[in-house]
Image (spheres, grey):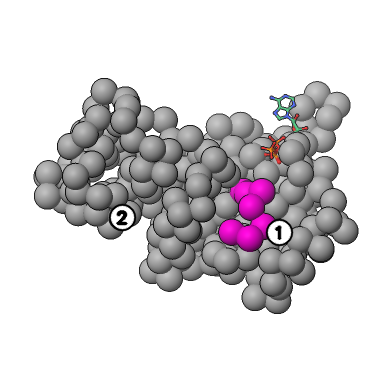
Amino acid sequence: MLKTINLHKKYNDFTALKSLDLEIQEGEIFALLGQNGAGKSTTINILLGLIKATSGDAFIHNISVKDHPEKIKKHLAYIPETVLLYPNLTGIENLDFFSKIAGFNYDKNELSALLKRTGLQEIAHEKPLGGYSKGMRQKVGIAIALAKDAKVLLLDEPTSGLDPIATAEFTEIIRQLGNEGSTVLMATHDIFNAVSVATNIGIMKQGELVQNLPSKAFSAEELQELYLKTI
Ligand code: ATP
């Protein structure tokens, strides 16, 4: 479903990504851990087509990111640390706007149903985004991903700054999406969250994927120990 082959990224003389070979199957949730600057966002940005790899390629549904960056976009949804939305528009209006940009025209009931699926309380749907908490905004981000019907989700520190309850709610939705067959690549610093939601854990160090393991092999404490030994 998502594959990178010998992916390299250089910024002038600095190598940000070295020979990344990654394969994530349908329904898998891959948590990518690593210190600041390890290359996690670089990986995600290459998959999104926001930056070009220096060499190697990535494939979504066997489609090359290098050759078909536009075609790839409709298979992907992206949720960054802070989902950028219009503060003056309501939750429903934001979802409607971004769905239309992606080429989908939903009626109000459908939009509301998408927001409800993320656990966003109905009372908030018609309120301006400006008054939403960060957790509520992230839920609108998930609703936009659902509206696009994207089967591959790229998440860059999506729970950073969320309180434990909002993190648990976000995690539960991601787990459900994985169970329903979505493929998820999530860059995170949250080891506890990674163990709880991911099927696979990768640890990056200075642009290299130095660990790639099934998460069920670990408790959070064991993963933390491995992480500290690795980085
Ligand atoms: P964080 O956890 O802080 O988000 P990260 O693992 O996502 O870190 P990246 O953002 O992928 O790390 O950065 C990898 C390396 O590439 C870093 O050393 C960063 O300084 C460098 N880098 C990223 N973008 C550029 C750029 N446009 N020009 C030069 N160097 C860059």
- Seen in the image, is 215 located left or right of residue 178? right
Whether the magenta-drawn stretch holds residue 189 is answered as yes
Q: Is residue 134 visible?
A: yes
**Comes first in the chain, label 1 or label 2:** 2
- Seen in the image, is 231 located left or right of residue 82? right
User: Which circle, 1 or 2, is nearer the viewer?
Assistant: 2
Q: Is residue 158 visible?
A: no
Residue under numbered circle 2: 119
Q: Secondary structure at mark 2?
A: loop
Residue under numbered circle 1: 202
Q: Secondary structure at mark 1?
A: strand
Q: Residue furthest front?
A: 164
Under mark 2, the amino acid is Gly
> Mark 1 packing: few (<14 Cα in 10 Å), some, or many (20+)?
many
Q: Magenta residues?
A: 187-193
The residue shown at (36%, 43%) is 136
Viewer-nearest residue: 132 or 2? 132
Under mark 1, the amino acid is Gly
Q: Give how far apart the Cα atoms at labels 1 and 2 are.
A: 29 Å
- Seen in the image, is 33 located left or right of residue 27? right
The residue shown at (56%, 43%) is 160
